[in-house]
Image: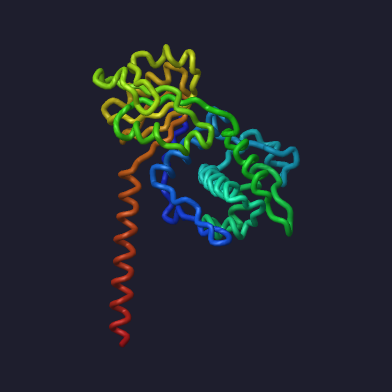
């Protein structure tokens, strides 16, 4: 539908899920679910506050490019926002490890993202760091958090109390970034009324009623594909403006509603292709070496 913002979360082929830290510090290894959920929801948060389209967010009055500040139609590329979420994750770990400053070269070393690309990504939002000094970790962390609109708590609604829903509720990374699952819903009468972690599972028919009190703008769909569209309709009716969709189906939503699709099958298919490609390349190289002997 016209005007709908629909994005698909993707796993980088080199996500660098375990950092090689200073002084032998090994930062925590992140799971695939961690990568999807954290990045997907962070980008939804940004999209909500820049509706109806993802627009440039200026966090400094002084811009490196004045035209950017004056252009109301300038859109920040989605890959840039995804990388900003990656920087945020690294900065959070650096701050926890009591690292006070970091250079763009060190950002490249830890994330695999080119230092020039890192500086270019930051340039969309203003001036950062000092030549010869680098970036103050806590300051950069706070500014990126404000840019991505995760400097304050945001309640969310989760529909689907199955295995995936349970994993999401129990995932501590959401609360670390101030994303709070405020209510859990399901249509299975055997589950309604029972506890999922510390949440009572509510009847999905009460979604609109409950959200009149919670006023959540982000919803998570963790239901089978056959039920996903109906759930999306209920979420929109309840006032949700951004949806993280784990169901393997394309949702139809009104203009002004943002959707991030998380497709494990898509990512596995891409990884499978690259594995096959690498194996073919290795075989061809070996054959060439043998012929050359």
Q: Closest to the observer: 286 or 88? A: 88
Quadrant of the rendered image containing residue 147: top right
Instruction: Give coordinates of residue 113: x percent, y percent.
Output: 54, 56
Q: Position of residue 192 (x, y in %)?
A: 30, 18
* Residue 159: percent from left, percent from top: 36, 25
User: Residue at position x 59%, y 30% from top?
Assistant: 152
Q: Which residue ends up furthest to the left in the rendered image?
A: 190
* Depicted 290 relative to depicted 226: above or below: below
Q: Is residue 290 above or below residue 47?
A: below
Q: How is the image coloured?
A: rainbow
Q: Residue at x 68, y 51 (%)?
A: 135
Q: x, y (%) of residue 293?
A: 31, 88
Closer to the camera in the image, 217 or 161: 161
Q: Along the line of sight, which residue is nearer the eye, 152 or 128? A: 152
Q: Is residue 292 left or right of residue 115?
A: left
Q: Is residue 214 left or right of residue 144?
A: left
How many numbered circles are shown?
0
The residue shown at (52%, 47%) is 86
What residue lies at 30% left-to-right and 34% top-to-bottom? 163
Q: Is residue 266 above or below residue 49?
A: below
Extreme residue in the bottom direction: 293
Res 201 quadrant in image: top left
Closest to the observer, 56 or 227: 227
| Quadrant housing the N terminus | top left
């Amino acid at each position: 539908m016209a005007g709908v913002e629909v994005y698909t979360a993707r796993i980088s082929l080199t996500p660098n899920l375990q950092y090689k830290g200073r002084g032998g510090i090994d930062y925590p290894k992140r799971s695939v679910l961690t990568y999807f959920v954290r990045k997907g929801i962070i980008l939804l948060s940004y999209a909500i506050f820049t509706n109806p389209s993802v627009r440039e967010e200026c966090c400094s009055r002084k811009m490196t490019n004045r035209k950017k500040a004056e252009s109301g139609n300038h859109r920040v590329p989605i890959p840039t926002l995804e990388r900003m979420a990656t920087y945020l994750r690294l900065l959070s770990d650096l701050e926890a490890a009591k690292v006070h400053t970091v250079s763009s070269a060190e950002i490249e070393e830890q994330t695999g993202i080119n230092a020039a690309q890192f500086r270019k990504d930051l340039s969309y939002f203003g001036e950062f760091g000092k030549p010869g000094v680098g970036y103050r970790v806590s300051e950069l962390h706070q500014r990126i958090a404000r840019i991505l609109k995760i400097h304050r708590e945001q309640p969310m609604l989760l529909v689907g109390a199955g295995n995936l829903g349970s994993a999401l509720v129990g995932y501590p990374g959401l609360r670390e970034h101030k994303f709070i699952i405020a209510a859990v819903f399901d249509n299975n009468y055997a589950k309604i009324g029972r506890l999922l972690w510390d949440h009572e599972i509510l009847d999905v028919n009460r979604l609109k009623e409950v959200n009149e009190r919670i006023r959540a703008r982000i919803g998570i769909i963790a239901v089978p594909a056959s039920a996903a569209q109906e759930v999306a309709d209920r979420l929109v009716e309840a006032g949700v403006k951004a949806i993280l969709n784990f169901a393997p189906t394309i949702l139809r939503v009104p203009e002004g509603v943002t959707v991030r699709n998380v497709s494990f099958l898509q990512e596995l298919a891409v990884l499978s292709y690259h594995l096959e490609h690498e194996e073919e390349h290795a075989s061809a190289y070996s054959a060439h070496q043998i012929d050359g002997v």
